[in-house]
Image (cartoon, grey):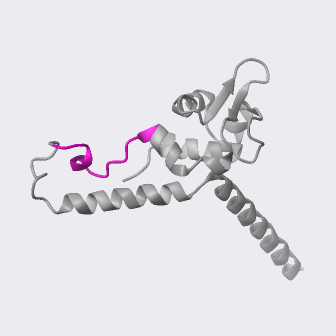
Amino acid sequence: MIITRATEYAVRAILYMSKFPTGQIVLKKDICRTQDVTPAFLTKIFQPLIKEGIVGSQRGVGGGFFLKKDPKDITVYDIFKAQEDPLHINKCLIGEGCCERDSFCSVHGAWREVRDGMKQRLEEYTFERLAREQEENIANLMRSKRESAVADN
């Protein structure tokens, strides 16, 4: 299973916006520039997030998008669900009667466990956590580069 490009860009954009206070407008052009996404595609991928109440938008000069929820209350699964819902893993989990083997196939249970485990793991990753981890990774990278530059001199 590979997530769609829309989901990938939505996750990246929400992570970027998580660095700003909840409710603060982040200019559309800044999101597009930092995330390498076109304005039209950004608008398209944010529509489901607006509908779900995760993102808000403001039109006009100085317009852009803002988080309606605190990053600690937004999970990666929330973004996945808005973009790709539902998470089925296999067609047999779509619903009763979707598979002629429903009544006896033991793999259905395995697919269900995998799906439920994946959903649970995606729910563990909040954007507050991801933003904090990204800042730590950047700080470690910068520290490593400084140490390497000092060692080279």
Residue in the picture at 40% in, 51% down: 2
Q: Is residue 128 magenta?
A: no
In the picture, the quarter occupied by the C terminus is bottom right
* Vertical side of 122 occupied by 70: above or below: above
Q: Quadrant of residue 70?
A: top right
Q: Is residue 8 left or right of residue 34?
A: left
Magenta stretch: dominant SS? loop
- Judged from this view, the residue extending furthest toward the bottom is 151
Q: Position of residue 42 (x, y in %)?
A: 59, 32
* First to last magenta residue range: 83-96
Closest to the observer: 92 or 29?
Answer: 92
| Number of numbered markers | 0
Query: Please, is residue 41 above or below residue 144 in the view?
Result: above
Which residue: 64% across, 57% down?
130
Give the x, y percent position of residue 22.
Answer: 74, 40
Nearer to the camera, 150 or 84: 84
Q: Residue at x 57, y 46 (%)?
A: 11
**Relative side of 153 to 43, left or right:** right
**36 lies above or below 144:** above
Q: Which residue is drawn at the image coordinates 70% and 34% (left, top)?
A: 66
**Residue 136 position within the rendered picture, expressed as x and y whole percent measured from the top left:** 74, 65
Q: Can you give x and y, in whole percent of width and height, for residue 74 in the image?
A: 60, 47
Give left or right: position of 123 versus 150.
Answer: left
In front: 94, or 73?
Answer: 73
Q: Is residue 94 magenta?
A: yes
